[in-house]
Amino acid sequence: MVETWYAIVSFMLVMFVVLDGLDMGAGMLSYLVGKTDAERRMVVAAIGPLWSWHEVWLVGFGGTLLVAFPNILAVTFSGFYLALFLLLWALVGRGVSIEVSGRIEDSLWRTGWDFAFVASNILLAILVGAALGNVVRGVPLSSDGKFTVPFFTNFSPHGQVGILDWYTVSVAVFTLVTFAAHGANALVLKTEGPVHERSLRLARFLWKAVILLLAVITVETWQVRSELFSGMIHQPFAWLGLILVFGGLAAVLAGLPGKQEALAVVGSCAFIAGLMIAGAAAVFPIMLHSTLAPEDSLSAYQNAAAGHGLAIALVWWPVALIFSVVYFLFIYKHYTGKVKLSEDTQSPY
Amino acid sequence: MEETLFWSRLQFAFTLTYHYLFPQLTMGLAWILVFLKWRHLRAGDERYGDAARFWARIFGINFAVGVVTGIPMEFQFGTNWAAFSKFSGNIIGQTLAMEGMFAFFLESAMVGAMVWGEKRLGPRNHFLATLGVAFGSWLSGYFILVTNAFMQHPAGYSVAADGTLRLESFSRFLLNPWVLVMFLHNQCAAVVTGSFVVAAVGAFYALRGTHQKQASLFLKIGTVTGLCASLLVAFPTGDQQAKMVAKHQPVTLAGMEGHFHTSTGVELNIIGQPDMDQQRLDNVIYVPDALSFLAFGHLNASVQGLDAFPKDAWPTNIALLYYAFHIMAGLGTLFILLMVLANFQRWRGRLEQSRGLLWALMLAFPFPYIATTAGWMTAELGRQPWLVYNLFRTSQGVSDVLNGGNVLFTLIGFVGLYFVLGVLYLFMIGREIGHGPQGISLAGQLEVFHG
């Protein structure tokens, strides 16, 4: 039961990062691929109809974490207090800028909101990356099973750490570049004309950077927590993750030059999902690693909710998931193919 | 610790009150939109199509603000109320997750298509998307209210060896008698908000003499649904809600009514100010025996006063609780009067000439927001000092790793951000209303960017 719920909670988070990472990535490239206002509208329209559906995976992640591992949620969310509010506020800025930027045809209005859109997406990608880096590196959990963490201390990933150190900053940069590459793939798929051409050029460049940074991150992770790599050997899910990572990368590299645009998007989804699955499998069963004393780490087994609440939730969760996919398909089938400005943009008066 | 508790309560109250300004309009407008789309689909009358597009645009702005202000609510359970999350997460997490998985996924998938995708989807699927949004928004409300009902009147749980709560019966938790009443009461109130807003926009156009066909349509829809919903929110749902409080939270009823001393044949106080030092109401205007009758069904029933309970079980802010309840109930009564009058004049065919009444309808729209806010203050202040009624005190629930300054900092951040968001919202909605429902026909959505 604990393993199943760990997998479900991880799945929710993976879905959020893959789907919203696509929105963040496409959004942050708005000014690079869109030189005119109409081109930037195209970027917003490419993620427009489903951005809130993507964000709901974060709500689902919070909810399932609360059901299955209430103490983990309590310790983590209160420990990352300020950083989490920064994330929430950036989500407010991003959501609002998507909804209002197109409604008024005025160059100052558009420029202002497009800037807010790009800035909030960059900030979100960095925050999500730093958060994932913190989960892998660990937090300064003390023996009472709680922690608070400042934004930074001495930038060392050991002992009394801060949210930002050289390792988590590296993960944040890697996430930023990976989301950008992921978003560029999506824009290649969803747009045509100059935006499409620029996105394709950017994607080719960004994926080279992703591969380079992946090598750097792997070496760094080895430095910070080498035990994760030996643990991965015994985790079948870690193998699955690695297959997805390399399969996804191959799909991207084959899809981009070969004009198989959908394959490239599937590839970048698989790449990100694979990295997260491998990471989640590698840290299991430890959900929060203590950088102060490994024995104070919080394990999934000790922190799972007991009783048959989890068995009940295991009945409704797959049902809800199927419904959600049906809703998605109902909408998505109308939105396949390229963005059409005349149909998909928010019309001002 | 004291400060962390105080600021955390204020932050939750502020962010939740602000958030709920938006979903109540979403839920209220949703079925009105379904009706408009259905008429458009069946009769092919473009008047309904234009009206639906107009309200969908307003819905879209409203929904976006609702989403972005709603997500921080779920996270605050963990950030500010970590001890509460640990205590009850296995139970309240169920409904918070189900809200996301069953309801919010539906709503969020459909809403973009409903607002912008009429041409992509075609008439039939666009109607289905609108229906999906309406159903999703009400389902979402249900799951959130189950969560709140558990805090008001816990059901279907057991206490585990480590002191935390375990879910025992899923059906008793989901079908808590408290939630059935509260859901109907709350949803009727949301429809009151929606219909008052529709009527206000209709009155605005009627007074200005613009968009006249739409004005009479909005006035008709707004006043008919407004009358039905205003009646239903008071009776039977409000009445049942009060009886539920009388039965399960008698000390709350005493606080709501400013009823300090146990007695029989208790009056219903219409106006008066609680005097906490003297433990009585000042300047009371009352209806004799009415509280006994309303709460327990006969005129001589004994109603427990605050003196029947130990002081540490009293709601922590009785004066505010009293005012909140009376503002809600008083406004609810005025809504019925206004809507009866408006419907009477409309029935005589004189509503659009009654400028005084149109002014009243136009200016009335903020009051349902005040009434729902006061209603929720009654529910939540009335629940104090408990976070989960009779099981877990509010003071036990707060995160102990926080200091008050951090919480005050984020609270100020929310106040600033939400102020900007509010100005933006009013500006955008004002613009939509200023433009009006004409000229956003399907053809109007075309060719804007091709210059």
Image (tube, coloured by chain):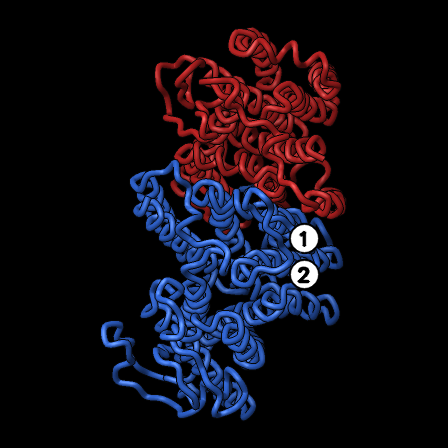
Chain colours: A red, B blue
Identify which residue, A162 or B419, lies in the foreground: A162
Q: In this view, does B354 lie above or below A267?
A: below
Q: Is residue B95 above or below residue A335?
A: below
Identify which residue, A287 or B40, lies in the foreground: A287
Q: Is mark 2 on a helix, strand or loop?
A: helix
Q: Can residue A33 be seen in this view?
A: yes
Labels 1 and 2 in the same subunit:
yes
Image mark for residue B168: 1
Residue type at mark 2: give it: Arg
Are discs 1 and 2 less than 8 Å apart at CB? Answer: yes
Q: Is B278 displayed left or right of A131 in the figure?
A: left
Q: Mark 2 lies on which chain?
A: B
On the rendered image, what quadrant is the N terminus of chain A found in? top right
- Marks 1 and 2 sit apart, C-alpha to C-alpha, by 9 Å
Image mark for residue A172: none
User: Which residue bears the numbered disc 2?
Assistant: B172
Counting from the top left corner in percent of width and height, residue B115 is at: 60, 54
Q: Is B399 displayed left or right of A229 in the figure?
A: left
Identify which residue, B70 or B144, lies in the foreground: B144
Query: Which residue does the image show at 58% across and 67% down from the upper left?
Result: B178
Residue type at mark 1: give it: Glu
> Around disc 2, counting alpha carbons within 10 Å, would you say few (fewer than 14), some (14 to 19), or many (20 or more)?
some
Query: Which residue does the image show at 67% across and 54% down from the upper left?
Result: B118
